[in-house]
Amino acid sequence: MSKASWSSKTFGLAPLPDPIAGVTIVEPLSSGPGWWAGAPGAFYDAQTKAFYLYYRLRKPRHLGRGAECRIARSTDGFAFNTIWQATKDDLASPSVERSAIFRGLDGIWRLYVSYVDPEDSRWRIDVIEARSPEAFRPQDRRPIFTAGQLGIEGIKDPCVLNFGGLYYMIVSYAPRPVAVTDQQRSQMHATADVYNTGITRSHSGLALSYDGMHFDWQGDIFSPRDRGWDAYAARIGCLVYIPPVFTAFYDGSQTVAGNYEERTGLAISLDLKTFHRLSCDGPALVSPHASGSLRYLDAVQLEDAIFYYYEYARPDGSHELRANRVVLG
């Protein structure tokens, strides 16, 4: 939104990034569809005066799917150096996805990691604690949510924020279908990714915690519509707060065919419970290349600017991780 369009009765507008103007932060391991660098989770730590960026590298499904995840550090938000990495084998999992890095009010670093549970092939979320990001040990992870615990078919892609001392975790979750055939039931987790089956859809849910470790499930806060460009997926990835408005950036797709190639829409909220779509006729942010995918956008608000990080489709169909700094005001 440009300054020229503001008025004395317009409030809470979040400035948007220009996707094309973004700077490439991480390139995929190879070229072509299925090779991705992205799913970022960003955090700025005032104590160390540094940006911390979680991301994952993925291979095409026939080559083994989710490969590894990394954490990198930067002093300017653009030039990152890897300080930690783990593979899906470290989690004994078929795949690992978007995770959230956060330094709690108690000074402890936490990595909220989403991965496929090897026990039931459903997405779950665990947490790893450490005194510094370099010290995260996958074997020390503790469960936050399993799909079975909540009576759903998958939960992943956490976004963690703190408001007034209370931790908010926004997640993607797959509700249990009301009616499924025996064949659908057998197919739901056969590929260890229920989101890619079309049997259920990708919703956004909320959980709350007083300590960053014990979360209470609050339920659905944002759902796919009955029709439209976001009828299959409506996955909130991050929030930008320009008082008094929370702007949610969410990943949407019309059908299961758009799974893995979502584009970004906008919604707003005043209370983090009720969200109103702004992107009714189509996505707000896309790549000009290949599928048009621009997804998993995360944002860090720092002083007079917002640093946006997002996964972006390249001309050859692969995805890269980009950054874009937008000045406020």
Image: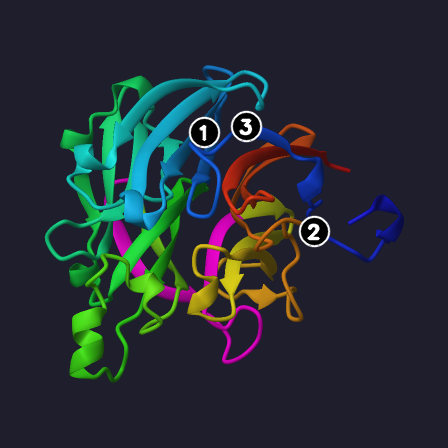
Question: What's the distance in space between the residues labelled 1 and 3, CA to CA?
Answer: 10 Å
Q: Which mark is residue 206?
A: none
> Residue 207: image x %, image y %?
33, 54
Q: Is residue 236 visible?
A: yes
Tell me which label, 2 or 3, sits earlier in the chain. Answer: 2
User: Quadrant of the image for the C terminus?
Assistant: top right
Residue wearing tag 1: 53
Q: Secondary structure at mark 2?
A: loop
Which is nearer the eye, 165 or 279? 279
Name the image quarter holding residue 326: top right
Amino acid bearing label 3: Ile
Amino acid bearing label 1: Leu
Q: Secondary structure at mark 1?
A: strand
Classify residue 328 as left or right of residue 73: right
Q: Are marks 2 and 3 in contact (CB under 8 Å)?
A: no
* Above or below, 29 relative to 257: above
In the rendered image, residue 227 lying in the magenta stretch gets the answer yes
Residue at the image position 34 percent from the left and 62 percent from the top: 195
Graded by Cα atoms within 10 Å as few (under 14), some (14 to 19) or many (20 or more), the crowding at tag 1 reads: many
Residue at the image position 27 percent from the left and 60 percent from the top: 154
Question: What's the distance in space between the residues labelled 2 and 3, CA to CA?
Answer: 29 Å
